[in-house]
Image: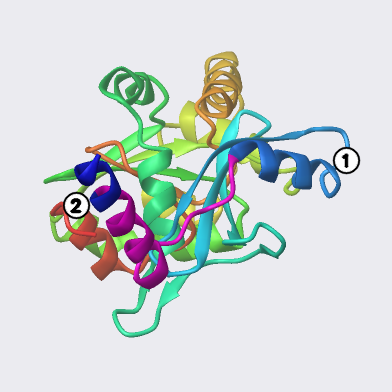
Amino acid sequence: MKKSLFAWVLGVLFLATNGWACPSVDKISKEFRTIFIGGVVKVVKVQPSPVPGICEVIVEAQGRKRLTYVDQTGRYLIVGRLIDILTKKDLTQERLAELLRLNKKQLQKLDTLVAFSRGKGPVVYLVTDPDCPHCKRAERNLLPLVKEGKITLKVILMPLERLHPQAKQKAVGIICDKKGLEDLIKGYKGSQCAEGQKKVEATVKTLLSLGIRATPTYIFSDGRVISGVLPAEKVLSLVRGKK
């Protein structure tokens, strides 16, 4: 009896001083149904974020896991990214990389989608759209690393036709004519062939099934998936297993 009372007192003191609890999945699901009409967003998990008083909410929408945040009462929805100003780390990006991490079998499947491979050293997959402006920045950032033999770049072409109507034609041309990174950067068009058409269509379908919908997206040999343009230094640090 005394032990139980002592444990209860310790628990109360912890909550009063250091501890705090996040709302339940049921509570957040109920609140989200009033915001996301149609039930297209499923709340998977609610847990404390690295920032005291802010809870991380893992949701699933269109087969893809995403992150958002609420305060510890569940009343306020916080849309955006958590950035550690002191360390300059994008905490949201790092967490998403963990959530979307691919397993060994999925990484092996990626190899069947590679349009071309260049360089030496640790493998980095780049999912890119031939007409995506941000992808061009990513490609140019990676080019020196490829030339210097610091990475092996495996390029996977994912044309987003709704945004870039000519991208699929360019992707097919690069595959059919067996072109490389420099040609991709320059916007190579090239010829069309059934083999290239089939590969591009299979690539888009497979990537969507893996929850990859954005370009540019980097995939590292440990399965981490990061979307958005990364500087060369960041790519190298991730290749070395650092966060």
Mark 1 surroundings within 10 Å by alpha-carbon count, few (fewer than 14), some (14 through 19), many (20 or more): few
Depth check: give the residue in front, 64 or 184. Answer: 64
Q: Is residue 160 visible?
A: yes
Mark 2 surroundings within 10 Å by alpha-carbon count, few (fewer than 14), some (14 through 19), many (20 or more): many
Residue 37: % across, % down: 88, 40
Residue 155: % across, % down: 39, 40
- Mark whose residue sits in front, 2 or 1: 1
Depth check: give the residue in front, 164 or 17. Answer: 17
Q: Is residue 228 above or below residue 206?
A: below
Q: Is residue 2 above or below residue 53?
A: above
Label 2 sits on residue:
239
Depth check: give the residue in front, 43 or 142. Answer: 43
What's the mark number on residue 72? none
Stretch of the chain drawn in magenta:
7-24
Q: Residue visible at 32% across and 85% down? A: 86
Task: Name the quadrant containing residue 219.
Answer: top left
Task: Name the quadrant containing residue 72.
Answer: bottom right
Q: Residue visible at 58% across and 34% down? A: 64
Residue 191: % across, % down: 59, 31
Depth check: give the residue in front, 55 or 22. Answer: 22
